[in-house]
Image: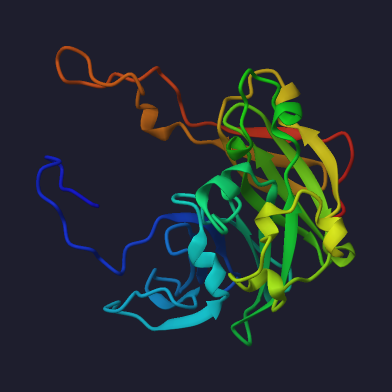
């Protein structure tokens, strides 16, 4: 529930509210935003006015001051809190959007989602305003990806996606301490859109599958482009990625407002730990397959 600055007065629900995460800008100056609460996709004009918001079937957002369109499968309402749509990429021809789900759905329950390695990537056709494909992205084993003591599967996240070419995307897979860039091949993965994996009655669920291949699901094949944690000076919580050219990428961290989780000091202040927001420019040893 939302509260005001005093943490005493409860605020009413605002259906226009979003938790924006992914952002792309078109050549004409319009914007698309992916947000993680509903989760939903928003189309904005060049002045920032919301033209339309796209939501999963069954999500109730009555009272918005802009049009709504139900386009995403209802199962996406099972998104983990604060772990809905996170990454957003726009194709070079500006006809297609690619949307990544940060974490596996709580499908059928939270424990299954927390233990799962299977999250989802959606393909959205802008002209028809329809989802045209849905793919499975399989996380690495958490303890192998980030060998810290007691590393849990639910620490694994997708935080960013970038378009490379019509067949490939660049995806940022991470924990709060380790981040890696992978390229994935869309044409070699199974399109599960409209299948039983969108039906909440399916058991076991997609998120519960230990080996999707046994159910004839080819997950997105991925190839390591760069292990960011091997670079000196790389901060924690890398969440943003952008491509400058074939040989150069930039990454950005989230410093969480430099709030110290230990809480307030004796004067009622939270001095933080001095964590700064950073943008780092990285030269790659191999060129990216941009088209």
Residue 175 is left or right of residue 82, and the answer is right
Which quarter of the picture shows residue 207?
bottom right
Protein image colouring: rainbow
Residue 195 in the figure: left or right of residue 87: right
| Quarter of the image that includes the C terminus | bottom right
In percent of width and height, residue 172 lies at: 68, 44
Q: Residue at x 30, y 79 (%)?
A: 62
x, y percent for residue 139: 72, 44
- Residue 249: x and y, percent? 72, 41
Q: Residue at x 44, y 77 (%)?
A: 58
Depth order, front residue of 161/59: 59
**Count of numbered tags:** 0
The single residue placed furthest to the top in the displayed view is 266
Of residue 133 and residue 217, the one placed in the foreground of this image is: 217
Can residue 97 be seen here? The reply is: no
Is residue 136 among what the camera can see? yes
Residue 187 vertical position relative to residue 116 in the rendered view, above or below:
below
Q: Residue at x 56, y 75 (%)?
A: 72
Residue 6 versus residue 126 in the image, above or below = above
Of 107 and 13, nearer the camera is: 107
Residue at position x 39%, y 70% from top? 47
Which x, y percent locates residue 104?
Answer: 61, 52
């Amino acid at each position: 529930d939302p509260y005001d600055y005093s943490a005493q007065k409860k605020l009413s629900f605002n259906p226009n509210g979003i938790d924006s995460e992914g952002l792309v800008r078109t050549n004409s100056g319009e914007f698309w935003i992916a947000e993680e609460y509903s989760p939903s996709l928003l189309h904005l004009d060049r002045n920032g006015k919301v033209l339309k918001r796209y939501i999963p079937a069954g999500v109730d957002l009555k009272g918005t001051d802009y049009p709504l369109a139900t386009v995403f499968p209802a199962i996406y309402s099972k998104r983990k809190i604060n772990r809905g749509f996170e990454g957003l990429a726009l194709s070079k021809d500006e006809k297609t959007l690619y949307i990544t789900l940060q974490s596996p759905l709580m499908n059928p329950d939270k424990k299954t989602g927390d233990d799962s390695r299977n999250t989802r990537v959606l393909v959205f056709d802008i002209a028809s305003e329809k989802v045209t494909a849905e793919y499975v992205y399989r996380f690495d084993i958490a303890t192998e990806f980030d060998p810290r003591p007691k590393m849990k599967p639910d620490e694994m996240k997708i935080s960013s996606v970038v378009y490379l070419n019509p067949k490939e995307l660049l995806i940022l897979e991470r924990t709060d301490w380790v981040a890696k860039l992978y390229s994935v091949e869309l044409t070699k993965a199974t399109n599960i859109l409209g299948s039983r994996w969108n039906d909440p009655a399916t058991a076991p669920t997609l998120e519960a599958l230990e080996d999707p291949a046994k159910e004839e699901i080819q997950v997105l094949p991925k190839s390591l482009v760069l292990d960011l944690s091997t670079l000196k000076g790389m901060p924690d919580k890398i969440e943003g990625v952008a491509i400058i050219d074939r040989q150069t990428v930039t990454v950005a961290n989230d410093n969480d407002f430099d709030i110290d989780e230990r809480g307030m000091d004796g004067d009622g202040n939270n001095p933080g730990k001095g964590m700064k927001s950073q943008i780092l420019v990285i030269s790659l040893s191999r060129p990216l397959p941009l088209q």
